[in-house]
Amino acid sequence: MKMTFLRSLFLLGIFAPTAWAASEAPVVDVYKSPTCGCCSKWVDHLKANGFTVRSHDTQDVAAHKVRLGVPAGYGACHTAQVNGYLVEGHVPAKEIKRMLKHKPRVRGLAVPAMPMGSPGMETTGHKDSYDVYVVNRDGSTQTYAHY
Ligand SMILES: [Cu+2]
């Protein structure tokens, strides 16, 4: 019984695997509503790409958007932070890795809204084309990648 409880905590990500805690894997703090399905799927996408994720359920994701500096019109369903960078919305892990590698002097990355076909928003058919934006420190943006 006790083992089952611990195991479920483990599966919920409350206990991080020890091997990852000791590794160099970047830790991503994700702020999302407890009922957001596509947010959880994006978390799975990050984990599948080697990130350690601390998922924080909150009813006030907007407060974190303000705190981390999401520009008006660039908001999505979840907000995250990694190594001091903002990551807003369904940003592909590949682009987060590129940013962490090159360490640009920017606020972070954003995929506004929830494009179909972006990581966590996979569907069987239709895929939207979408841009990953870099958010500069002054809040201005430019295209970082196009999908
Ligand atoms: Cu979403």
Image (cartoon, rainbow, N blue to C red):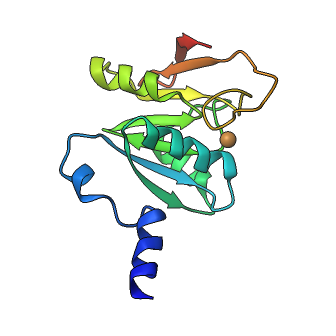
The image shows residue 7, relative to residue 89, as above or below, that is below
Picture coordinates of residue 81, whole percent (x, y): 41, 42
Q: What residue is drawn where x is 55% and y is 19%? A: 133
* Count of labels in the image: 0
Q: What residue is drawn where x is 33% and y is 60%? A: 16
The image shows residue 55, relative to residue 48, as above or below, that is below
The one nearer the camera, 2 or 97, is 2
Picture coordinates of residue 138, whole percent (x, y): 45, 23
Quadrant assignment for the N terminus: bottom left
The one nearer the camera, 134 or 46, is 46
Task: Locate residue 103: give its quadrant.
Answer: top left
Q: Is residue 103 left or right of residue 42?
A: left
Q: Farthest residue toward the bottom? A: 1
The image shows residue 94, relative to residue 35, as above or below, that is above
Picture coordinates of residue 128, whole percent (x, y): 75, 19
Picture coordinates of residue 136, whole percent (x, y): 44, 21
Task: Locate residue 49: give its quadrant.
Answer: top left
The image shows residue 28, relative to residue 60, as above or below, that is above
Q: Quadrant of ligand 1?
A: top right
Q: What residue is drawn where x is 71% and y is 33%? A: 114
Q: Is residue 135 left or right of residue 32?
A: left
Q: What residue is drawn where x is 56% and y is 20%? A: 132
Q: Farthest residue toward the right? A: 125
Task: Locate residue 120: give its quadrant.
Answer: top right
